[in-house]
Image (spheres, coloured by chain):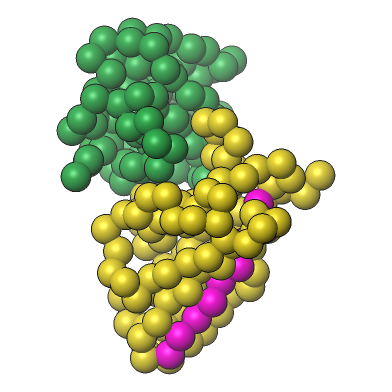
Amino acid sequence: DAGVTQSPTHLIKTRGQQVTLRCSPKSGHDTVSWYQQALGQGPQFIFQYYEEEERQRGNFPDRFSGHQFPNYSSELNVNALLLGDSALYLCASTQGSEAFFGQGTRLTVV
Amino acid sequence: GQQVMQIPQYQHVQEGEDFTTYCNSSTTLSNIQWYKQRPGGHPVFLIQLVKSGEVKKQKRLTFQFGEAKKNSSLHITATQTTDVGTYFCAGDTGRRALTFGSGTRLQVQP
């Protein structure tokens, strides 16, 4: 049983570009959350998807958007990238309370 | 919004010494979870505490949830080099969106 998988693992983008990150949740999990983890900080909640709808959102601008597909996989889109968007982006799936995290996508904006 | 503070930020111990990290939330929590993140890795779930005053043990690790459900602690007895990593608490207000503390980085010297 595969755990949470994310792609790509690393990505380098230029300021102003757009990026799409992908996440496949753990088998049987229907809820996907996205977090941004800056270097030396704890993960910050971006948003959560359930039944293909955004259920909750953290304090992130509208440049951050997402989607959940019928198979529960999810995408995170970031438009108009800023240098400050450089971080590890983590996807977590839940079925109950325990959150299972993927390995993350390391995004570098130059 | 909800804030979760964690102290200390960093601790360096000799192998065999004890270690404690403390977590305080600005709001009452539905539950609190603890995660461990190894260098270069992703957060891995350790435990969830739900009840006021709850204490749980996992081998050398002891977790406590405060009576007011606003604070928590993790204590490691007789640290080992395998305990190295960053320990995060994460508060849940009941909607499965986690608010992480800034983490305590533990370094264990052999």
| Residue B77, placed above or below residue A30 | above
Based on the picture, tell me whether residue B84 belongs to the magenta stretch.
no
Q: Position of residue A66 (x, y in %)?
A: 48, 67
Which residue lies at the image location 53% right of the left edge and 49% below the top edge? A50
Colour chain B appears in: green
Magenta segment range? A17-25
Q: Position of residue A51 (x, y in %)?
A: 56, 50
| Residue A5, placed above or below residue B55 | below
Q: Is residue A96 left or right of residue B89?
A: right
Residue B14 in view here: no
Colour chain A appears in: yellow
Q: Is residue B67 left or right of residue B61?
A: left
| Residue B95, placed above or below residue B56 | below
Quadrant for the C terminus of chain A, please. Answer: bottom left
Q: Position of residue A57 (x, y in %)?
A: 35, 54
Q: Position of residue B60 (x, y in %)?
A: 54, 17
